[in-house]
Image: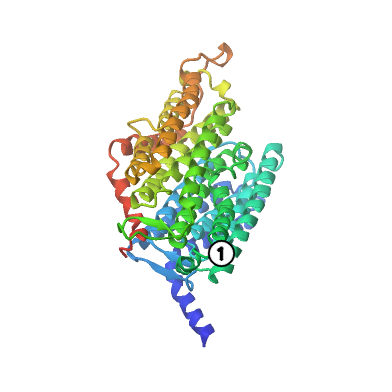
Amino acid sequence: MEFGHYLQINLASLPYFIPELILVGTLLLLIIVDLVLKDKPSAGWLSLIALSGVIIALIAVIGQYDLGTRSLFNGVLVLDHFSLFFKVLFLAAAALAILFTMASIELAGRPVGEYYTLLITLVLGMFLMAASTNLIMIYISIELVSITSFVLAAYIKRATRSSEAGLKYAIYGAFSSGLMLYGFSWLYGLTGTLDLYQLARSLSEVASQNPLAIFLSVLFILAGFGYKIAAVPFHFWAPDVYEGAPTPMTAFFSVGPKAAGFALLIRFFVSGMAQPSLVESSMWQAIGDIHWPQLLAVISAATMTLGNLIALVQNNVKRLLAYSSIAHAGYALMGTVVLTQEGYFATLFYLVAYYLMNMGAFLVVIVFQDLIGSEKIDDYRGLGYRAPIAAIAMGIFLFSLTGLPPTVGFIGKFYLFAALIKAGEAYYWLAIVGVLNSVISLYYYVKIMKYMFLDRPAEEKAGALPVTLSMNLMLVVLMVPIILFGLYWAPLQEFTRNSIQFFTGTF
């Protein structure tokens, strides 16, 4: 009787699992088509199938916004606006990664059936990460994302740096996942539950008895979350992986899995380690004497500072953007430490802004890598004269990453700093650290601009570069929202505010 009851609940959850089923169908179709067309040119068909599957899944996700909040599959997953926000972001990043792959020559002539299959599987894992409300499901979803990421990072098998990237990614991933699982085991031993919502209720009862044990379990768990968002001290994999992986996949790694890590981190700490404040309905407080917000604040400051300082001395643009990505993880973490609705809104808003500007920056890297065959910043000399549209686009993306007006990056950082200031004097120091780091980042971003526009190319390299129409169109498509949302961000603001209703209990 009990088995039948659980089976009925699982079957009833399937209609709310349509986007994930579409992704499963897409990856199965990719495998079949790749097998059927194995000895024939099939890259075009496989790219079309992957892109179509992502677009259909996106339509299905948008159609779920009217369904409200629902617990799925006996409480291991949840459907809410918060998870839907991240699913839209994941699919948008995957669509651009597929388009980048189609336009780039880096994977030309290589079999892409496994590549797209792994990419769609990775997106499916990120879907599960954003919706998980059970400790076991959290671990399974992280492992699904991690294992597929290891293979994709090392996809160019004969390239030494690609193989090195995959190996380092796997070693660091295994280590951090082991620590996280150990932390989960401590929480389960203390509370006797795997459900996040039950965890919060149980911790409120035992926190005063075992504060040190719970704090240590949080430290172990942060190893797994910190690894996914490339936060200090679990950032070591990022530079080598970003440099060694295929550049379209590097662009995806910098946005997709990082956003999934933030989705998981926010849901875990708000649902499992905090309780609504008695002072104001839009605020939370850490359970008992577990000072995890202060710990996150220290990690945020260390992450942005280390990322920016090491980026100053980089000569490879992909490694520079890798350390920049680490720094931006620190910026986004600032919104999570204040335990307010404004803080979480700021983090989500900044993740969308980061998606636009970082994917755009990596597209320019792909353009120049294909045309000049180099990722060295020194070889960017004079590219403003040889490829003006791509160079201007790079300038806009870099200024937005710095946080200069009138770009969406400025609006994102404004919301982050405003959330810190509004939270009170205890967070002023973090806001100051964030401002100082933004000034530091301006130096290495402007250095690229100097090479492109103020330095002349060598005589033998003075000719114009043949940037394809498709590349220029994609650059324009990414440039326009950077400026548009920097001047009029109300639609993006409304979309983001609707996505944090999960925290306000308005459903």
| Residue at screen point 45% across, 29% down | 394
Q: Position of residue 381 (x, y in %)?
A: 53, 18
Residue 388 seen in render: yes
Location of residue 337 with respect to 210 vertically, above or below = above
Write down the quadrant of residue 406 in the picture: top left
In the image, farthest residue toward the top: 459
Q: Which residue is mark 1?
A: 187
Quadrant in the picture for the C terminus: bottom left
Q: How many C-alpha atoms fall within 10 Å of the one at disc 1: few (<14), some, or many (≥20)?
A: many
Q: Position of residue 130 (x, y in %)?
A: 47, 57
Instruction: Say what secondary structure mark 1 lies in.
Output: helix
Residue 51 seen in render: no
Quick check: 124 left or right of 277? right
Location of residue 10 with respect to 506 vertically, above or below = below
For the image shown, how many numbered marks are present on the structure? 1
In the image, farthest residue toward the bottom: 1
Q: Position of residue 441 (x, y in %)?
A: 47, 29
Location of residue 192 with respect to 34 vertically, above or below = below
Q: Position of residue 358 (x, y in %)?
A: 47, 38
**Residue type at mark 1?**
Leu
| Residue at screen point 48% across, 69% down | 202
Colour mapping used in the image:
rainbow
Q: Nearer the viewer, residue 482 or 18?
A: 482
Location of residue 29 with respect to 352 vertically, above or below = below
| Residue at screen point 52% across, 54% down | 123
Quick check: 82 left or right of 443? left
